[in-house]
Image (spheres, rainbow, N blue to C red):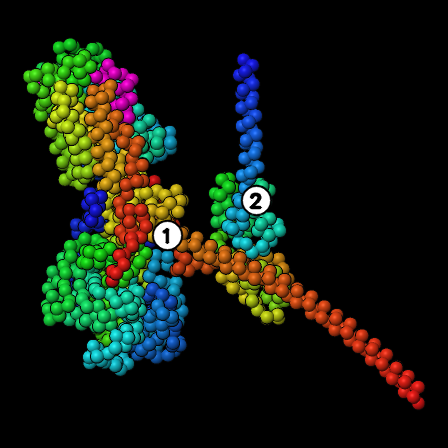
Amino acid sequence: MIAAILSLTALGLILGLGLGYAAKVFAVEGNSLVSELVEMMPGTNCGQCGLAGCGAAAEAVVEGNAAATVCPGGGVALAQAIAAKLGITLSLDGVADKGPMVAEVAEEICIGCGKCMKHCATDAIVGAAKQIHGVLHEACTGCGGCMDDCPTGAIILRPLPQTLRDWNWSKPALA
Amino acid sequence: MNTSISSALPAVAASPHAQAQGSITAVMAKVMLALAPATLCGFWFFGLPALSLWIVTIAAALAGEAICLRLMNKPVNSTLFDGSAILTGWLLAMSLPPWAPWWIGVLGGLFATVIGKQVFGGVGQNLFNPAMIARVALLVSFPVQMTAWVMPMTAAHAPGLLDALQVTFGGGAIPDAMSSASLLGQAKSELSRGVNLLHVFANGLPTSFSGARPGSMGETAVLLIAAGGVAMMLMRIITWHIPLAMLAAIAVPAAIAHGINPARYLDAGTHVLSGAAMLGAFFIATDYVSSPTSRAGQIVFGLGCGFLTWVIRSYGGYPEGVAFAVLLMNALTPAIDRLVKPRVYGRDFKGLPIVLKSGGK
Amino acid sequence: MGMLEMLNGARWGVHPHDDHKRPAADVPLRVMSLPAKLCVPLLQHVGAPAKPLVAVGDRVLRGELIASAQGNVSAPVHAPSSGIVTAIGEVTAPHPSGLPFAAITITLDGKDEAIPLIEVADPFSLEPAEVSQRIADAGIVGLGGATFPSAPKAQLGRKLAVQTLVINGGECEPYLSSDDSVMRERADDVIDGVRILMHATGAPQALVGIEDNKPEAIAAMRKAAAPFATIKICPVPARYPMGSDRQLVQVLTGKEVPSGARTASVGVLVNNVSTCAAIHRAVRLGEPLTQRIVTVNGGAVAMPGNVLVPIGTLVEDLLAFVGLKETPARLVMGGPMMGAALPHAQVPTVKGCGGILALTAAEITVEEPSPCIRCGSCVKACPMGLVPLEMAAHINAGDYDKADALALDDCLACGCCAYVCPSHIPLVQSFSHAKGEIWKRAQKKKRNEFTKGLAQARVERLEREARERAEVAAKRKAARAAQLAAEAAAAAAAIEATGSQESSI
């Protein structure tokens, strides 16, 4: 009886020590999940999520401090990708899927102050001071950061216009 | 005219804008057509009890399907009569002893569509052949009722309507004068008693092409079953791959073993012509849902079904092995589909683009 | 052919029991009367869109260059008839989306005045490069529907020293007979075009594959090709998709093109018979590609047949020319297997348009899809050896990567699988959707990397600017300090000087 108790205890101790040792020795450096999420995010550190850049946002999502829908620039597509990666159910309540967005400057309201240009994380807004500005569609992530800086409210977000190239058949509903 | 074109066009649709004639129901109807002669022959030899069991089994299969569709809030009317549930019940009835009591048919029919099919998600989703799942479940649960065979009779000696209803619904035992063993059952039991086959079948094998011998409806009229199978091939419902592979894989090992030790092993002809080999090869193993989709995969599947059938018949505890063999191979179908794919044009079997020989143009 | 392959069977494709080609194919070719206006699109080919060279209000003549090619793979566009350019802007594309694309609208004056053409009496005296240039200048693209510009293709063939020209007279799509019509009515043009193309590419032999359901075309082509030993007319079995280049090359030469490669990698160049006829006119007569033969067919058409149509003609005008018996349930550009459903009839015909179908409700399928029963019909029908049912299952589950791993990108979208499916599953739509999603994902990734790069560049720029500002400030500070010191020193020196002066005085 005593022999059995002792041997099992010894076995438990040895295995426990082994596990503890393995956990220390084979520990994964950093949190690979965070770096994977950073890779998926727009990476422009636009700050529209209210956190200090994409890295901070990814950490917050992994730790559960932010929802998968944290990134305005990434939109629903990114939220779904994050949810799939983390294996969480995604609540899209209050998140209307407007598809990819781009900023647009209303020419008649723009006063050419240039504040938006200074804010843009990807230098997508071009134009000289005191001139009307334009937005380069390819460079704009649609984060909307410039909208808050515009003193006249001349910047709005619009859905990226659809072209023949990126039009696609919808997924057929199968029985 | 022009205004009418521009105003009346419906929503656009993806290509192709043409389709061959065909539907699930049409496919099922053709299979039933091919099965009909053997079934009628069965009614002829085993009388009205066989007919009433056939009706009860199909009704139970339909009821099981209807209940499940109702519970899952799926459209009942369009799916129930697509023919698949009727065919499942039909095939099950073909594999039951023709004079089995009604509750065998009811339990089997319900088991086939509820457990064998709808639990997996309905038509197209089941891993195993529903009729064979039900047959095996009945066989292991009710071995006595499932092996009570009767002698075939001509219409003159057949029981009348009331007697027939008594056989199916009355629950009485089959009169001794009528009961009999199937050939494979006889061989198995004699072997287990240590009597060698040469002695048992000294007067020749009781094989009958007409179907006048004990067995289930699907086992006896082998020639009509085979003719139905050929008809299905001509109607392009099935291809030769599974049936031929399966029959060959029964016949070849049987022939070899019989050649080595005729006292212990039945010959190839008996193996192919008795039991459910024909029904299995043409109607059971060829079930679309539970068999591989590529031609090479179907050959592998057929060979497996046939060989396992022979192994179970020769070494297993049951005299007949088609149902077990098919179910075992059904379980392997996803693996076969994964491993034996058709080669993609311009790629090798591993899926990599083919490499042109250097020096080629 | 390996053992497994033999067991798998070499048969592929489908054989529609009624190809609906006749009686339309047997009606003599008609020439379309000039419509009031033409909308000539700038992108009628694979590659970059052409750049307009005319302005609104300009008068153009037939054959005049109105938009020039942009880049290596592109094609110019010419005016199909004389008239005034009334708009350069967007018109609805002949595409199911109904989205617009750029086009030049010409209001015709009906005079059909042409620019003078520069003929070449003996094209075989020209350098191959010069022949290619004439093909390029005429705006010729693959008329079988792929619309790859013909000149860069010929140059590629020359560069890779292809050994065989395969001339595609398969025309396997049901309903269509425009290639059939070209071969019947213009066999000499086709054969001359083939010879010119052999000269341009340096290919020593040409094989013309024609489906055996076109005996008249085969006879006409045999007669035209009789004097030339290097051109062989090869009847092939009528089976869809025989007109797919990979399938035709395999049937005619036995060669299999590796996945992802062009047929030129096995020493074969494929060109359509209509393209060859256009090459003949371009090189010999100097005539640019401004018209083509279009099959107008379908149950709703009053007088189906082949019509010579100026490119840019609105489908509406073309249907008015042949007349409609009833309101069509669907309009299709191309054949019923791979053609594009049109959003409405106010879309222009393009260079790659071999047919316009006005189909009745009875001709198109509107069956609801039912569950897959794994019958394997699609597997047997697929000419590429794919497993459509598995790809569709993965796509339905949203797993595009798994579908891609099953060689989704090798799918031709030929439609055989959806055609034979007893469950009426829209397999082609499923595959097109998945291909589009995979493409979009790749684009999104590229864009992400691009914007990341921009953000990185901005951070670096801001840092650099801050550093420069700091440096400038430091320099200025240092300069100011130096100046102050110098001033102080100067002042001190001055004082000293005055002092010394004073002292010296």
Position of residue B102 relative to residue C437, above or below, is above
Is C169 displayed left or right of C51 in the figure? left
Q: Residue furthest left?
A: B203
Position of residue C406 relative to residue C85, above or below, is above
Residue B72 visible to an observer of this rendering:
yes
Circles 2 and 1: CB atoms closer than 8 Å:
no
Q: What span is colored magenta in the figure? A: B131-154
Counting labels gives 2
Q: Quadrant of residue C225?
A: bottom left
Split into 4 quadrants, where in the image is the N terminus of chain B? Answer: bottom left
Please give the name of the residue rendered at 26% of the width and 19% of the height, measured from the top-left corner: B139
Magenta stretch encompasses residue B146? yes
Please give the name of the residue rendered at 13% of the width and 10% of the height, measured from the top-left corner: B177
Residue B114, image x and y in percent? Answer: 32, 27
Which residue, given by chain and number where applicable, does mark 1 sit on? C435
Which residue, given by chain and number where applicable, does mark 2 sit on? A30
Split into 4 quadrants, where in the image is the C terminus of chain B? Answer: bottom left
Please give the name of the residue rendered at 38% of the width and 53% of the height, measured from the top-left corner: C436
Q: CA distance from mark 2 to mark 1?
A: 36 Å
Magenta stretch encompasses residue B137? yes
Residue C373, image x and y in percent? Answer: 28, 38
Q: Secondary structure at mark 2?
A: loop
Q: Quadrant of residue B5?
A: bottom left
